[in-house]
Amino acid sequence: MIKLRSKRFSRSSSKLNNGGNSIKGGAEKACGGIRTEIKWELRPGGMLVQKRDNGGSSEGEGMITIRVSTVSKWHDISIEATSTFGELKMILSLVTSLEPREQRVLFKGKEREDDEYLHMVGVRDKDKVLLLEDPATKERKLYGLAGTKPIETPCRTISV
């Protein structure tokens, strides 16, 4: 019978206490001999995570620029990273002439729902999003069934 011993690749507790810079219940961490406090943030999905340090630039924090491509044009949209695709559609309705319900937004080859968050599906700064017109809406416009009334052509009566 062979007895296997597991190897640990962590430091012993005596090596962690260099000069008194130990971790206190996860609230502080040692960083080059300086005590720094760990900051936490609550994500929209309900997950508690350690807050990222953006290199000290607080200007425009959380804002990303997305390149939205249509069939013939593209638009650069600045939006918060924690926004939803529904909020992106509202901004796109101002730029394009399409209402949000007429828009289909695709990211990484998949159509995204209005309640999905940009950062949760992986949209980052300078990413490309594809905007298409809903085919059913396009067909309704083509056949004149867009509203409740069909589109009427104006005509003039001639009296003799």
Image (cartoon, rainbow, N blue to C red):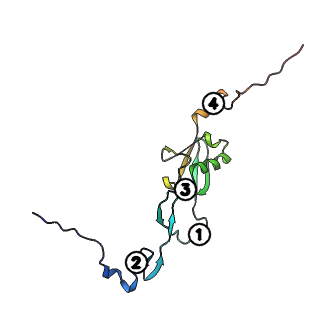
Q: Looking at the rendered structure, which numbered label has been put on residue 58?
A: 1
Check disc 1: other Cα within 10 Å, few if <14, some if 14-19, many if 20+: few
In the current view of this chain or complex, which residue is farthest to the bottom? 19
Dot 2: what SS? Answer: loop
Q: Looking at the rendered structure, which numbered label has been put on residue 140?
A: 4
Rendered location of residue 140, percent (x, y):
63, 30
Rendered location of residue 14, percent (x, y):
31, 82
Report the Cα–Cα distance between label 4 and label 3. 34 Å
| Type of amino acid under label 4 | Arg
| Type of amino acid under label 2 | Ile
| Type of amino acid under label 3 | Lys
Rendered location of residue 132, percent (x, y):
57, 40
Which of disc 3 and disc 1 is earlier in sequence? 1
Report the Cα–Cα distance between label 4 and label 1. 47 Å
Report the Cα–Cα distance between label 3 and label 2. 37 Å
Which residue is nearer to you in this view: 135 or 10? 10
Which of disc 2 and disc 1 is earlier in sequence? 2
Would you place residue 72 above or below residue 147 in this image? Answer: below
Q: Looking at the rendered structure, which numbered label has been put on residue 126?
A: 3
Labels 1, 2: front one = 2
| Type of amino acid under label 1 | Ser
Which of disc 1 and disc 4 is earlier in sequence? 1
Q: In percent of the image, x 55 and y 72: which residue is there?
A: 56
